[in-house]
Image (cartoon, rainbow, N blue to C red):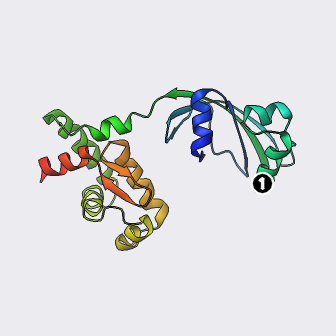
Amino acid sequence: MLLNRSTAEGIVDGTITLVLRRWDAPRAKVGGTQRTPVGTIRIDDIAEFPGSHRVTARQAKAAGYPSAKAAQADLDRRPARHTYAITVSFLAPDERPALAADDHLTSADVDTITSRLDRWDGVGVPWTREYLRLISDNEAVRAPDLAARLGLDIPRFKRRVRQLKGLGLTISLDVGYRLSPRGQAYLRLTG
């Protein structure tokens, strides 16, 4: 479930407690979490309605819309079989920026990162170190261009970069990526 920055900020400050979505099948589950640019949110509840559901004034207000009409117009841009009213709350600040900034890696930190990268590489064709080097050598290059160099589809490439970001090794830029101080330190320490 993608959330724009203003919606995520509204969830963090408590002014938004509901997200409205139209999908053919559920894409969120109760108890799940979602990282956003401003922190992690929790999915507290999900109500499913037919695709023809009309947004109530209460739902619109909880979702941060000025009116039910505005919320309905936004939903009507994406026809689907179901309408979902997803109750959300703020869980915690995003820990990734602080992690990414930490370039003082202990041997235990290096071992932990290496273990995770090895586990991901063990699932198929190894990719983690290649991605780290690619991003290191191509800061601020568009994701489609990097994906093309690897012969991968863009969604798979971006998903893998998000995995590396979860370890604090990469940082997303407005265009492309760069290695974080933590990622740079890891490459320096592991050769």
Q: Given the current orientation, which residue lies at the most extreme front position?
A: 66
Residue 5, image x, y percentages: 57, 44
Q: How many marks?
A: 1
- 40 to the left or right of 74: left
- 181 to the left or right of 62: left
Q: Give the structural element (helix, strand or loop) at label 1.
A: loop
| Residue drawn 24% across the image and 43% down it | 182
The answer to whether residue 162 shows anywhere in this view is yes
Task: Indicate the quadrant where residue 143 lies.
Answer: bottom left
State the residue in front, 111 or 65: 65
| Residue drawn 36% across the image and 62% down it | 140
- 177 to the left or right of 35: left
Residue 133, image x, y percentages: 24, 60
The answer to whether residue 126 shows anywhere in this view is no
Give the residue number, with chain letter if any, for mark 1: 80
Residue 150, image x, y percentages: 35, 70
